[in-house]
Amino acid sequence: MTRNLLLIAGLAVLVLGGALFYMGRDPLTPVTTNSADNPAEAAMLDQTDEAGANSDANSDASAVDTSRVVEMALGDPEAPVTVVEYSSFTCPHCATFNEGVFRQIMETYVDTGQVHFIKREVFFDAYGLWAALVARCGGPERYHGIVEMLYQDQRRWAGSTDGAQVAEELRRIGRRAGLDNEQLDACLSDRDMATALMEVYRANAETYGIRSTPSFVINGELHGNMSFSDFSAAIAAAAE
């Protein structure tokens, strides 16, 4: 599984690099067929021997530096209840949660110090990975604001089959958040960050059994998507 995720990460950055290059950008300076010059292609070609896939996967996972993937948290870290949200930026149900129940949880539990809330990304497709690279481009200070814009504009950018259009829509969101084109190009062509994000997702999915989005881990217990009343009951039970 690790090997496949790393290949997806490499492919996602390669495709995005091509889209930006086509649009007149130069994030990979430029995209070439030489893996030594193209970090995204190098990521895709790291493993070529199917017979050694299992041992290679373990080697790849240990080689990925995940220290840059910081937790994006809200609220008091000493709160009695920790809620971890697992969502994909291309998931319509995640957008609905973010615009509804999440805001109720923030007002009722996070802002009052009862819940420490952590958002973690899930990657089912390349567009979701691109969106995460943009969301994290401005650091923790801008992350949650960019997430809001990604979900609010989800129908506009996530439904397109044109990679160049998706890339430009994501860049537009980044610029609205105060990032410039140079920053966005650097983030969107960062193969190491892309592979790190995928590895963190893989590890969390295996640890907590994440199979759908949105999913939630409340004080270590996995839950599916819920109404606010069900969240309230789960938070109350976790706090006991």
Image: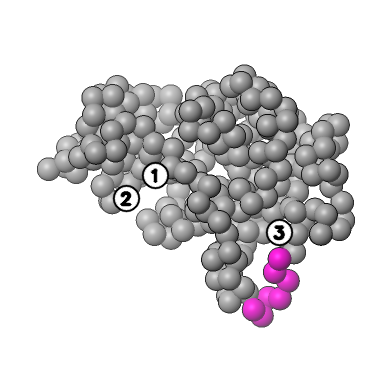
What secondary structure is marked by label 2? strand
Residue 45: percent from left, percent from top:
75, 64
Q: Label 3, on which residue?
A: 43
Report crowding for label 2: few under 14, some 14 to 19, many 20 or more residues within 10 A (C-alpha): some
Tell me the magenta residue range.
46-52
Residue 105: percent from left, percent from top:
30, 28
Q: Is residue 105 visible?
A: no
Q: Is residue 134 visible?
A: yes
What secondary structure is marked by label 3? helix
Residue 181 is a magenta residue? no
CB of mark 3 within 8 Å of CB of mark 1? no
Which of marks 1 and 3 precedes in the sequence?
Answer: 3
Residue 49 is a magenta residue? yes
Determine whether, in the image, residue 173 is placed left or right of residue 205.
right
Q: CA distance from mark 3 to mark 2?
A: 32 Å
Residue 56: percent from left, percent from top:
62, 73
Report crowding for label 1: few under 14, some 14 to 19, many 20 or more residues within 10 A (C-alpha): many
Report crowding for label 3: few under 14, some 14 to 19, many 20 or more residues within 10 A (C-alpha): many
Q: Residue at x 46, y 58 (%)?
A: 203
Q: Label 2, on which residue?
A: 222
Label annotation for residue 215: 1
Q: Is residue 67 above or below residue 182?
A: below
Q: Residue at x 81, y 59 (%)?
A: 36
Identified by mark 3, the residue type is Ala
